[in-house]
């Protein structure tokens, strides 16, 4: 067993080093079912409290290296307007974004988060949950395991991510809120379904799904809002 991984992940509850373990087989089965049905799955208390403290500490020590960005973007993460489209087109709906990142290349070599990200145990576990093999770590040296940082007024508005799946680890829970809002099955290859996207942007609550955000979240093909001031996450898939 990986000794350092044992100090980061609750391996007694989630023995991810052994994918043949009955506990992990049942967990993988649950995650697959939730991803198939809801496009999102969470795992409670995956990271040990002491490790979370270390992750928070290593971020706080480098807050001066976080670049905070404030701009107006559309749900597709573009800041430029396309005047050839109708005024009410989702691509012409712009919302405020205010957040920052501690880039991965700023992490110390012995970083807790960096170490976890680079473990084969986590990679193979996520691959099994997704039912996709092989999967690879992101090669981008700036963004592969960056910390997303928001102050109480920070927000990431409704948006689609630019990747097929996302693994998120919350290292600090909000003082209030903690609701994860998302909209599954909005679009598919060859069909952007702009009418449904427009409904979401206009606040059609019938499309939303909700869950309590936890410490490990696997997400598929999503459109989301992240507001860590109240911890409201919104996604469309």
Image (tube, grey):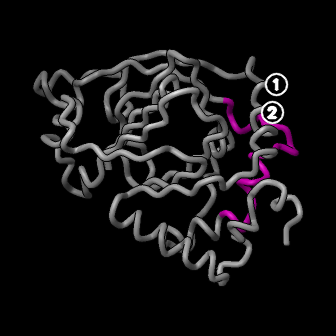
Judged from the image, the secondary structure of the residue bearing numbered disc 1 is loop
Q: Residue at x 72, y 71 (%)?
A: 15
Judged from the image, the secondary structure of the residue bearing numbered disc 2 is helix
Q: Residue at x 31, y 47 (%)?
A: 209
Task: In the rendered view, tell whether residue 156 sits above or below residue 96.
Answer: below
Report if residue 118 lies within the magenta region: yes
Measured from the top left, where is residue 186 in percent x and y?
24, 50
Badge 1 is on which residue? Answer: 61
Residue closer to the observer: 177 or 65: 177
Q: Are marks 2 and 1 in contact (CB under 8 Å)?
A: yes
Badge 2 is on which residue? Answer: 58
Chain part drawn in magenta: 102-122
In the image, taking residue 73 as reference, residue 150 lies left or right, namely: right
Task: In the rendered view, tell whether residue 158 sits above or below residue 122.
Answer: above
Measured from the top left, where is residue 47 in percent x and y?
71, 52
In the image, taking residue 192 as reference, residue 136 lies left or right, namely: right
Measured from the top left, where is residue 29 in percent x and y?
49, 75
* Number of dots carrying numbers: 2
Image quadrant of residue 16? bottom right
Q: Residue at x 67, y 82 (%)?
A: 21
């Amino acid at each position: 067993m990986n000794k350092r991984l044992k100090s980061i992940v609750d391996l007694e509850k989630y023995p991810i080093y052994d994918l043949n373990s009955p506990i992990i087989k049942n967990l993988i089965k649950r995650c697959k079912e939730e991803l198939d049905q809801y496009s999102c799955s969470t795992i409670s208390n995956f990271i040990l409290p002491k490790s979370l403290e270390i992750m928070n500490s290593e971020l706080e020590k480098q807050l001066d290296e976080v670049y905070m960005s404030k701009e107006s973007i559309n749900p597709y993460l573009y800041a430029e307007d396309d005047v050839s489209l109708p005024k009410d087109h989702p691509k012409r709906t712009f919302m405020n974004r205010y957040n920052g990142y501690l880039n991965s290349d700023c992490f110390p070599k012995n970083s807790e988060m960096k170490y976890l990200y680079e473990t084969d145990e986590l990679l193979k576990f996520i691959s099994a949950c997704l039912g996709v093999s092989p999967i690879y770590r992101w090669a981008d040296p700036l963004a592969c395991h960056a910390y997303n940082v928001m102050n109480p007024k920070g927000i990431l508005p409704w948006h689609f991510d630019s990747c097929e799946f996302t693994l998120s680890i919350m290292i600090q829970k909000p003082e209030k809120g903690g609701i994860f809002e998302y909209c599954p099955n909005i679009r598919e290859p060859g069909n952007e379904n702009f009418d449904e996207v427009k409904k979401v942007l206009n606040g059609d609550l019938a499309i939303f799904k909700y869950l309590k955000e936890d410490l490990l979240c696997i997400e598929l093909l999503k459109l989301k809002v992240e507001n860590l001031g109240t911890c409201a996450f919104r996604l469309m898939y």
